């Protein structure tokens, strides 16, 4: 074993967090598409794929250390959203929880002088800064542009453009 049981457990938990985030974003994408938010649907589908990539990145890291990763069972994501804005508020909370989880793994790795894992997770730290900023920026659009049907249409158009930059 090249990493401690504690760090391994935390990394496996992170795999589950990433898998569940991917599932949540896919569910939101489906809800958006059915409710006429085509841009938001594309945005969330792309984000679902990104979260899956994050999960795979951790699995690959463990595999390179010759450690079998635990592949989680995912939780059933919500099927209905209160609103597009609420879906983004929940997404931001999820991203903030991911940041806390990454920080927890880094703290454990540093306590155990696990420099490999600490260095590996630097990429995730930077990614989380971008993720939280992205969702906060989208949420600001609701305050700046509004929440009526025309405003939601404009936000949806913005989200369609954002999917290519995430």
Image (cartoon, rainbow, N blue to C red):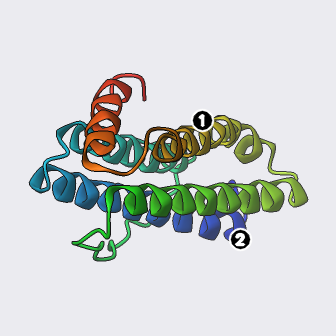
Which quarter of the figure is the N terminus placed in?
bottom right
Which residue is disc 1 drawn over?
130
Q: Quick check: 114 above or below 138?
A: below
Q: Residue placed at 53% from the left, 50% from the top? A: 62
Q: Residue placed at 40% from the left, 56% from the top? A: 85
Q: Could you tell me which secondary element the residue under label 1 belongs to? A: helix
Say left or right for 81 vs 11: left
Q: Is residue 1 visible?
A: no
Say left or right for 139 vs 151: right
Q: Position of residue 143 (x, y in %)?
A: 52, 46
Report the front residue among 111 and 39: 39
Report the front residue among 144 and 116: 144
Q: Residues within 10 Å of mark 1 (few under 14, many from 20)?
A: few
Q: Quadrant of residue 22?
A: bottom left
Which residue is disc 2 drawn over?
6
Q: Which mark is residue 111?
A: none
Q: Earlier in the sequence, mark 2 or mark 1?
A: 2
């Amino acid at each position: 074993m090249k990493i401690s049981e504690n760090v391994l457990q935390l990394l496996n938990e992170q795999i589950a967090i990433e898998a569940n985030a991917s599932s949540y974003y896919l569910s939101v994408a489906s809800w958006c598409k059915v409710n006429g938010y085509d841009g938001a649907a594309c945005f969330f589908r792309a984000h679902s794929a990104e979260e899956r990539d994050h999960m795979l990145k951790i699995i690959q890291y463990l595999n390179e250390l010759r450690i079998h990763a635990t592949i989680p069972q995912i939780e059933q994501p919500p099927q209905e959203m209160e609103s597009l804005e609420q879906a983004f508020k929940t997404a931001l909370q999820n991203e903030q929880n991911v940041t806390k989880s990454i920080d927890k793994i880094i703290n454990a790795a540093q306590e155990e002088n696990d420099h490999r894992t600490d260095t590996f997770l630097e990429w995730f730290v930077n990614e989380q800064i971008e993720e939280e900023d992205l969702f906060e920026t989208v949420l600001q659009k609701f305050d700046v542009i509004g929440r009526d049907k025309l405003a939601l249409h404009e936000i949806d158009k913005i989200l369609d453009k954002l999917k290519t930059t995430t």
